Amino acid sequence: MTSIDISSNIQSGSKARLIPVPADSKKEERATSVLLSTFMLVPQFAEAVLSDAGAKIGARSNIKCFTEIVFKRKGQNRLRPDGLITITNRNKSWSALIESKVGNNVLTKDQIEAYIDLAKEVGADALITISNQFAIIPTHHPVAVNRNKTRSIDLFHFSWLSLLSKASIISGAKAVDDREQAFVLRELIRYLDHQSSGVAPMTSMNPEWKDLCMAVQQGAVLKKTAPETEATAIAWQQLLRFVSLELSVATNRVCHVNLSRAHARNPQALLQAERDKLASKYLLSGSLSVPNAAGPIEISADIVRKVLTVSMKVNAPQDRSRATASINWLTRQLKDKAESDLLVKAVWPGMTSDTQCSLNEALDDPNKLIPEGFKEIPKAFEVIRVIDMGVKFKGKKTFVDLSVAAIPEFYRDAGQNLTKWVAPPPKAKSDKHDSIDDEEIGELPKSNIEVEVIDEIPSWALDYSTKPT
């Protein structure tokens, strides 16, 4: 936060309204106004969203939001951001310009960089963009911009669905005590969830997806730096984020894409790693985290085999003496899914290869997972579902549709039923004063030390302030 008052640079603008009056064709203005007014009316929702953009909101914070802002500028180019947020805490304030898109409208590099320059000129702390494009985390923007531009101005991105998801979770958990605020939040959800709002889910991979799949399946070599490789890697990251939002709504808990610290700090490093894996292994992969689940949901799309694999791994119990007992511990958790297409993999210690069979086979005979003559217990288990998409794999829309359906379905069938193994606590003795039987001890050895027995206690032994010389 800074002590700069951005309001002195405003030439004109309107306070954000919950019931805006722009023409029906101005969907961006309407959606932005409804969202920003909800920030002012429901501070808890504003904090849940804007804390991801670095804003600090407390009980005494003053939140003001405006739309159609025009700033005082010397130049003739009158940029007009869709919105402005200001948050004042005592003598410090934080502000962000808002640029939004709805429907199929997308953000562009030139436009974003122009608004970053404007934010710097008028004293804003950040630029926040909102569209139907997805970003894994708010600091990873779906459009690559000049890094030098963001050294003094922070850049964040939210998809409309991520905002809808967060509002739905807060509302579903009944986290807003104020009756009127809860009503306003439900109205925001109703508005964003309506097709007329311009908010849309992810429905398609990148335009190059079909040609890239066909080239790989015909034996072509992908180049790491090729535009189609990068576009596919970006689309995959957006798909992971979209699925995490779908899981969030389904579980009413915030689910997210797992990232290493290095990749969370550096989106370009994440993109490069995804491009390299795609070009070298023809694979797209990722991991989703669900709160309190037994483990992350691992997802992998194999372009050569045309399959999507979804799995979850759990440590095997280490307090069992037999491998069959360990396997039964896992399969009992999934017994209601015996007729499903789930697979079970056992991971064994040492150099022993993993073993795998269907869940139904493991339920009928756990020995099917045990290598012949092997006496150890398994280290871990992996529950897997393989979706063979065939010719539908290369379809831009069918690949997204099948993936979006498959991942939450796997969580319902397997993920939510699996529990972590936890080592049992040590047992305490029933009576800490239990006596020891003499027969258990046996005869004690005789000591060679001679002990002098005295009839009277010397006076120095009773005086604790002196010592014998």
Image (spheres, rainbow, N blue to C red):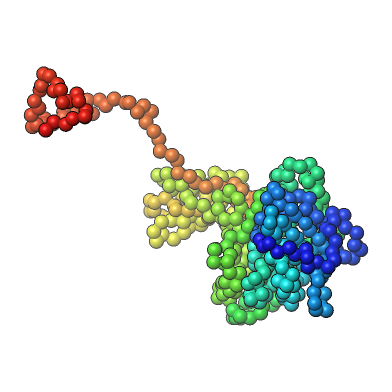
Note whether 179 is above or below 468 in the view shown: below
Closer to the camera in the image, 341 or 121: 121
Residue beneath the point at 90% across and 59% down: 21
Nearer to me, 421 or 137: 137
Give residue 280's quadrant in the image.
bottom right
* Residue 268 visible (yes or no): yes
| Picture residue at 61% right of the left edge, 44% below the top | 336
Percent x, y for residue 246? 70, 56
Say left or right for 169 vs 278.
right
Viewer-side residue, 315 vs 80: 80
x, y percent for residue 244: 66, 58
- Taking depth in this image into account, of 181 and 379 the one nearest to the observer is 181
Give how far across and how far down residue 364 sits, in percent: 53, 47
Q: Residue at x 83, y 58 (%)?
A: 16
Which residue is situated farthest in the top direction here? Answer: 455
Q: Quadrant of the C terminus?
A: top left
| Residue 304 visible to the viewer | no
The picture quadrant where one finds residue 463 is top left
210 left or right of 355?
Answer: right
The percent position of residue 429, horizontal first and vertical second, equals 37, 31
Q: Residue at x 63, y 57 (%)?
A: 256
Image quarter hosting the N terminus: bottom right
Task: Tally the numbered discs.
Answer: 0
